[in-house]
Image: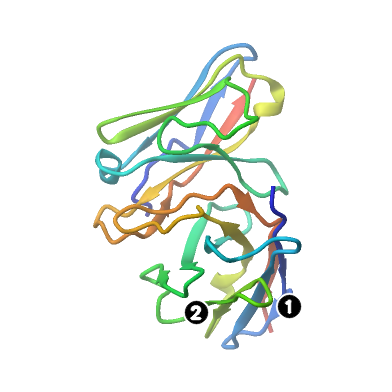
Amino acid sequence: SSELTQPPSVSVSPGQTARIACSGDALTKQYAFWYQQKPGQAPLLLIYRDIERPSGLPDRFSGSSSGTTATLAIGAVQAEDEADYYCQSADSGGSGFVVFGGGTKLIVL
Amino acid sequence: QVQLQESGPGLVKPSETLSLTCSVPGGSVIGYHWSWIRQPPGKGLKWLGDIFYTGSTKYEPTLKSRVTISVDLSENQVFLRLGSVTALDTARYFCARGPAHVVVAPAVPHYESWGQGILVTVSS
């Protein structure tokens, strides 16, 4: 089992906002990072240090974090956003091991 | 964005050692963290370990006894060795580049650049 918990799937209609949560004790002290992965592709970094966006990424993607939960929000969802989304952070024991959430499948209805 | 390219055998026999190479054509391994991350078919991502270009390593605890990550600065390559493989080690293996500064525990690196991955099947 992962130290970071994500819902297996989130469904949203086109044009609406999707929110994907990631829960874990380490998030109270460590940053969350978010990745998008489409079938057959490598993961793509969406958010780093809880809220920062890599240059060139649409501002429809945003991150937030409070307590033990980090959240990825995708505004004005498009069909092309259908993908798997993974959060990443550190182990809760403070050893500096990388941990990934189990992933969330975003379904665009 | 830097290009990363994984290479190695796509088929490994049980109990043998899986060996992969990550090449950075046109780039340099110097200054960065480098990690190996794998993904079994239809499943999620699992971090295997990390190396800073100076040679300092960190490994996932449950795999630590079987994993070795190393770097060749002159060849701009990062290596993964995973010993005593079983069918559970069948996965796509990704090489990923972390930040251009040392990351000290309890903090962890994140990954802006990834290779396309290489599918490795463990089977006799």
Q: Amino acid at mark 2?
A: Thr
Chain bearing tag 2 is: B
Q: Earlier in the sequence, mark 1 or mark 2?
A: 1
Q: CA distance from mark 1 to mark 2?
A: 17 Å
Residue A40 x/y as whole percent: 73, 49
Q: Quadrant of residue A44?
A: top right
| Residue under the point 40% across and 34% down | A50
Image: A10 above or below B26: above
* Label at residue B9: 1
Chain bearing tag 1 is: B
Residue B5 x/y as whole percent: 72, 63
| Label 2 SS | strand
- Residue at the limit of the structure toward the bottom, as seen here: B16
Image: A77 above or below B92: above
Mark 1 against mark 2, which lies toward the viewer?
2
| Residue under the point 34% across and 52% down | B107
Instruction: Name the residue carrying label 2.
Output: B68
Q: Amino acid at mark 1?
A: Pro
Residue A82 x/y as whole percent: 65, 30
Image: B47 above or below A15: below
